Image: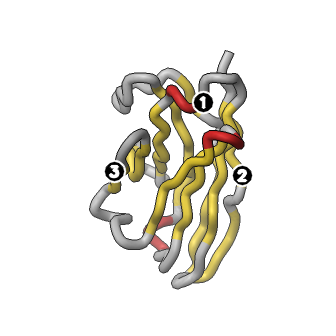
Amino acid sequence: QVQLVESGGGLVQAGGSLRLSCIVSGRTFSSYAMGWFRQAPGKERELIAAIRWSTYYANSVKGRFTISRDNAKNTVYLQMNSLKPEDTAVYYCAADRGANWNTPSYWGQGTQVTVSS
């Protein structure tokens, strides 16, 4: 059983930074593609960043957010800089061996990020 636990969310002013972490249980972390999604109120959940051997970023976060992973620590990170009020959302990490982001195999519980103007 693979479990994902996010942390690092909170309240920050516009222009500020936060770093989200997602710790993954299990001994096969390195075999998973990892993704960060977010869901704002009234909107669909969207993939904003992913990493396996390369990285992917949605246009809305490109140049401001950085995804990274530490396979020794079973952890994936999302460094978020130059935050904007429109970044306010619940952020979720997800894991999938095949990087199938339409239906990833595993989800974390989510962490709230609120950006004040």
In the rendered view of the protein, which quadrant contains the N terminus? top right
Task: Give the labeled residue for mark 3.
Answer: 56
Label 2 vs 3, first from the N-terminus: 2
Horizontal arrangement in the rendering, residue 58 relative to residue 92 (left or right): left
Dot 2 and dot 3 residues touching (CB under 8 Å): no
Q: Which mark is residue 7?
A: 2
The residue depicted at 49 percent of the width and 21 percent of the height is: 105
**Tag 1: amino acid:** Phe
Residue 52 vertical placement versus 104 (above, below): below
* Quarter of the figure with residue 108: top right
Horizontal arrangement in the rendering, residue 21 relative to residue 46 (left or right): right
Judging depth in this view, the residue of 52 and 65 nearest the camera is 52
Percent from the top left, x then y, of residue 26?
70, 23
Task: Give the labeled residue for mark 1.
Answer: 29
Horizontal arrangement in the rendering, residue 70 relative to residue 7 (left or right): left
Task: Measure the C-alpha gap from mark 1 to mark 3.
Answer: 18 Å
Residue 5 vertical placement versus 13 (above, below): above
Disc tally is 3
Dot 1 and dot 3 residues touching (CB under 8 Å): no
